[in-house]
Image (cartoon, rainbow, N blue to C red):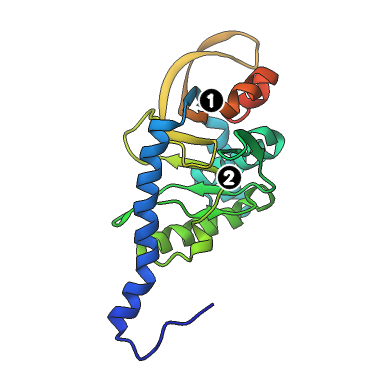
Amino acid sequence: MCQLPLLLPRKTRMLMKICPIVKYARSLQKRLMESKQSTPHLYLSKDVMLDPLIAFRNELKEQHNVKVSVNDIVIKAVALALRNVPEANAYWSTEKEEPELCGSVDISIAVATEKGLMTPIIRNADEKTLTAISSEVKELAEKARAGKLAPNQFQGGTFSISNLGMYPVDHFCAIINPPQAAILAVGRGNKVVEPVIGSDGIEKAAVVTKMGLKLSADHRKFLSTLDANFSDIRRLLL
């Protein structure tokens, strides 16, 4: 990696390091605007049960002293789903006018910074442990907010996740980050009352926690996939 000349003032060297990140953030804003205008967005929504995930998270903490967030588990679940449904881990080739499959599962994570939206990448997320994903997410988010991401840490990615679960947001539609073919929007968990089948086989009202998910997908890519096997695509939401 080339080094900035040490004879330059420190402030100038810092600006030279930050400029590529600012440039990328502005480029991303432009791409998202163009994506909304030119990419046919298809939306798939699902409210999923969050209680089993929370129980699993608590079990990891209490029995194994492993601390991970709901977002970390969502990233891992999506990565495994993409590995199981490789047709969804693809991008639309404007040159060939057809979708092309990606060779790895690289998850872009939307992070809001003072300089704009950044999308640091968890590469090969399907092959990493939850603790590795959790540690990497924290590190990349801190670097993104400090403007210290290296180009290879935010350029690329095969699928995006935007999580607003920490805010009072139940559902939202995320914009596809081209050339990727899809992005998953994650809302907050809410307690609701609904009928549940108990261990005795009797249906009764119960309080459960549900989380809203919405998949924004490129209709050109996902139309054929949905027609071929809709149940597989639903795994991305389940």
Q: Quadrant of residue 145?
A: bottom left
Q: In the rendering, at what x and y percent does residue 63 appear? A: 62, 50
Q: Quadrant of residue 123?
A: bottom right
Q: Quadrant of residue 99?
A: top right
Query: What residue sits right under mark 1 in the picture?
Result: 219
Dot 1, how many residues are within 10 Å of its Cα: few (below 14), some (14-19), or many (20+)? some
Which quadrant: the N terminus? Answer: bottom right
Picture residue at 40% right of the left edge, 30% below the top: 173
Q: Nearer the viewer, mark 1 or mark 2?
A: 1
Query: What residue sits right under mark 2 in the picture?
Result: 158
Q: Is residue 68 visible?
A: yes
Q: In the rendering, at what x and y percent does residue 91 appear? A: 59, 39
Compared to 130, does 207 lie above or below?
Answer: above
Picture residue at 66% right of the left edge, 44% below the top: 102
The label shown at residue 94 is none
The amino acid type found where label 1 is placed reads His
Picture residue at 43% right of the left edge, 40% below the top: 163
Q: Residue furthest front?
A: 95
Compared to 10, does 138 lie above or below?
Answer: above
Q: In the rendering, at what x and y percent does residue 232 appear? A: 67, 25
The amino acid type found where label 2 is placed reads Thr
Label 2 sits on a secondary structure element that is loop
Picture residue at 47% right of the left edge, 14% below the top: 194
Q: In the rendering, at what x and y percent does residue 32 appear? A: 39, 41
Q: Earlier in the sequence, mark 1 or mark 2?
A: 2
